[in-house]
Amino acid sequence: MEEQRVNIDDIMLHHKMWLETIDGQGILGDGKWKILKAVEQQGSLTGACQQLGLTYRRTWGDLKKIEQQLGFPLLNKSRGGKEGGMSELSPQGKALTAAFDRFHSRVDEVVAEAFDTFRDTLRELEKMQ
């Protein structure tokens, strides 16, 4: 079966970002950022896990690992009682989420501009045939 030629305007770019240690241990990326944003939006880790279809236990462990790596709490937590426990973003968790939002927006803009330039090059190459 022969592949059909693709319209250059239909070519899309997808990219992910993450931060890791020098020895390759992941710290924070798009996935964990989405979790933090969902905690902020839902007002709880349980709600965030339900919204994103994630298990509470694994997500809790992932966030604890980030807290250990960065040295500050991401969540304020209280144990269950009559109305159950709760967890919400700590002030540091809110600040980290906002900073990653700004960082991601800037990187997305630069990547989009670079991709537009690359797509222009593809159009020029296409004309050379």
Image (tube, rainbow, N blue to C red):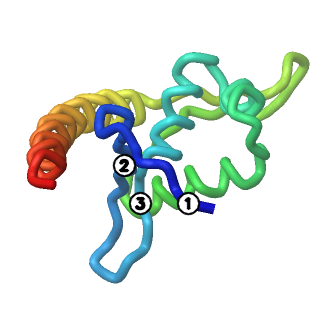
- Left or right? Give the position of 55 relative to 124: right
Do callouts 1 and 3 mark residues in contact (Cβ within 8 Å)?
Answer: no
Number of residues whose C-alpha sits closer than 10 Å to that of mark 3, classed few (under 14), some (14–19) or many (20 or more): some
Residue with the mark numbered 1: 2
| Residue 22 percent across, percent down from the top left | 28, 78
- Which quadrant is home to the N terminus? bottom right
Number of residues whose C-alpha sits closer than 10 Å to that of mark 2, classed few (under 14), some (14–19) or many (20 or more): few
Which residue is at a point 59% across and 56% down the rendered structure image?
62
Q: Quadrant of residue 52?
A: top right
Which residue is at a point 49% across and 49% down the rendered structure image?
4
Give above or below for 90 relative to 118.
above
Q: Residue type at mark 2?
A: His
Q: Quadrant of residue 111?
A: top left
In what element is the residue under mark 3? strand
- Which quadrant is home to the C terminus? bottom left
Residue that sits furthest to the right in the current view: 82
Residue with the mark numbered 2: 15
Relative to the observer, which residue lies in front, 45 or 92? 45
- Left or right? Give the position of 115 relative to 65: left
Relative to the observer, which residue lies in front, 78 or 2? 2
Between the C-alphas of marks 1 and 3, the distance is 43 Å
Do callouts 2 and 3 mark residues in contact (Cβ within 8 Å)?
Answer: no
Res 27 label: 3
Between the C-alphas of marks 2 and 1, the distance is 28 Å
Which residue is at a point 41% across and 60% down the rendered structure image?
27
